[in-house]
Amino acid sequence: MTANTPVLVRHEAKYVIPAGLVAPIRRHIAPFCRPDPHGKSDPPSYTIITLQLDGPGFPLHRAKKEERLNRFKLRVRTYDGQDSPVFLEVKRKFGSVVVKSRARINRRDWGEHLLRDTRVRLPFASDKEYVAFLTFLRLARQIQAEPVVRIRYVRESYFGVGEDYARVSFDRHLEYQPAEDWDLLGEGRKWIVMDDSLTQNKLEPWSGVILELKTTGDAPRWMSDLTKEFDLVRDGNCKYSTAVSCETLFRGTVGAPAYAAVLQDY
């Protein structure tokens, strides 16, 4: 399956690790993985920018904090530069299974009008991608979705060799900014660091890297060996809820977002 697959069903495991573990883990997986072809330079990396949407009262954030078994997130994602396409994503979680659908559109077609105009028509590569687009619109309209935060980070990514789908990624340089409009890149505005020990709720005095292991079936042996070799402990790190919680810590200050008051009793 490729990065453009409209619907992907998988299992995910996340770990917050110190930066010093990245190189040893990279060496450990080298015989079993190849670099993500979308990555640039060495190691293979690219920048991800995500505009997170939520409804009044932040039902999607609350669903995560309450660890509801059936929940979803709405994401508008782009990569690297100004000319990159935009992906409208619905990421659902049913127990331990993650189902992600995405629809690709041109950057010039993105805007608030997509959620407001019931007559919008766009070309898609397949019927499944069109269904993914309609699903995104239906859910966004259902919860009266609005922009909440932009999240930006650098991803280093690898794919398992000879596997249907096995992926290892390292996310670092995590930043966010409150979003009061539908702009994707947030250029010229302050980005706030969200990978320090306080934000990630860690006692260790280091900035964490998020390691993700993803498969569509049982984890391959080399992936299981990896978790044992480095004594990895799973951490349900959610970048969106981390950003919202971080903002909530600073409510009452000049820079507090409008939604901080909504969360003050949560």
Image: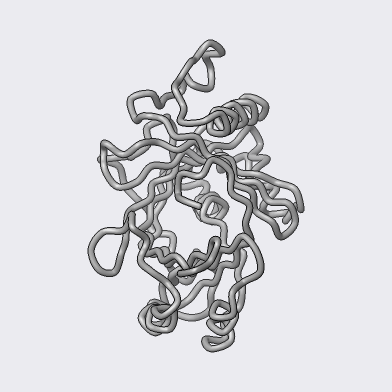
Residue furthest to the bottom:
229
Front residue of 9 and 53: 9
Question: Percent position (x, y) of residue 245?
Answer: 56, 54
Depicted 58 relative to depicted 194: above or below: above
Depicted 255 relative to depicted 170: above or below: above
Question: Percent position (x, y) of residue 162?
Answer: 49, 69
Q: Residue at x 45, y 76 (%)?
A: 32
Question: Percent position (x, y) of residue 38?
Answer: 33, 54
Depicted 184 relative to depicted 138: above or below: below
- Residue 30 placement: quadrant: bottom left
Q: How many numbered marks are there?
A: 0
Colour option used: one colour
Left or right of 159, for residue 37:
left
Q: Residue at x 31, y 58 (%)?
A: 39
Q: Residue at x 49, y 21 (%)?
A: 114
Residue furthest to the left:
41
Depicted 150 relative to depicted 245: above or below: above
Left or right of 134, for residue 185:
left
Question: Percent position (x, y) of residue 21?
Answer: 41, 82
Front residue of 227 and 238: 227
Q: Residue at x 37, y 61 (%)?
A: 36
Residue furthest to the top:
119
